[in-house]
Amino acid sequence: MTTSPRRADARDFEQRRLWLAKRIEAETDGAGLRPAPQTDAMLAEMAQVFCDGAWLATVILAQATLDADLMENDCLDGGLLNELRYGRGYVWLRERRNALVHANGPGPAVTVDSRTLDAAALERDARRAVELVIKGLAGTA
């Protein structure tokens, strides 16, 4: 490993935690999310890495969270299921996750240097991924 892991600044962590809580509250009209057990565990892990500023892990876990929900939730509305599988944002998330995990392009999807140089873009991707998960779990996608 060419760099050492860093912990998020406590203020940044708290700002991200509040942003996440506000997004969930807004999307669920204050009711909160009530995912099935494995989905809930994946959601908690995604929230942790998001608050820590681990943008790549956030995107990867966002798709894993949605995948868990699709497996655990057998009463999804057909329209929502269709959106989660084929909606533009969800296709973007799946493709972004696949590029990060499988590195099947002509070059790497990410490098150690790009984690720093492209941090703002990676954070935007992570926030978009989190918002997609919240909408998907809330049934408002």
Image (tube, helix red, strand yellow):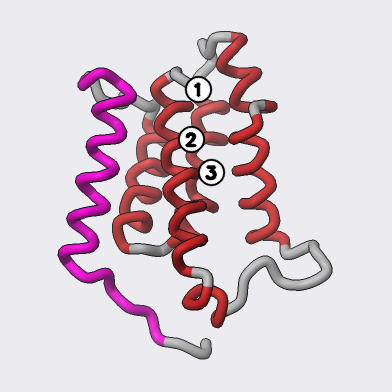
Where is residue 89? Give x, y as percent. 59, 35
Please tell me whether residue 71 is drawn above or below residue 140 in the rendered image.
below
Marked residue nearer the N-terminal end (2 or 3): 3
Where is residue 76? Give x, y as percent. 53, 13
Q: CA distance from mark 2 to mark 3?
A: 12 Å
- Circle 2 crowding by C-alpha within 10 Å: few under 14, some 14–19, many from 20: many
- Circle 3 crowding by C-alpha within 10 Å: few under 14, some 14–19, many from 20: some
- Circle 1 crowding by C-alpha within 10 Å: few under 14, some 14–19, many from 20: many
Q: CA distance from mark 1 to mark 3?
A: 17 Å
Extreme residue in the bottom direction: 2
Secondary structure of the residue carrying numbered label 2: helix
The residue at 53%/43% (across/down) is 64
Extreme residue in the right direction: 106
Residue annotated with mark 1: 141
Residues shaded magenta: 4-30
Q: Are marks 1 and 2 in contact (CB under 8 Å)?
A: yes
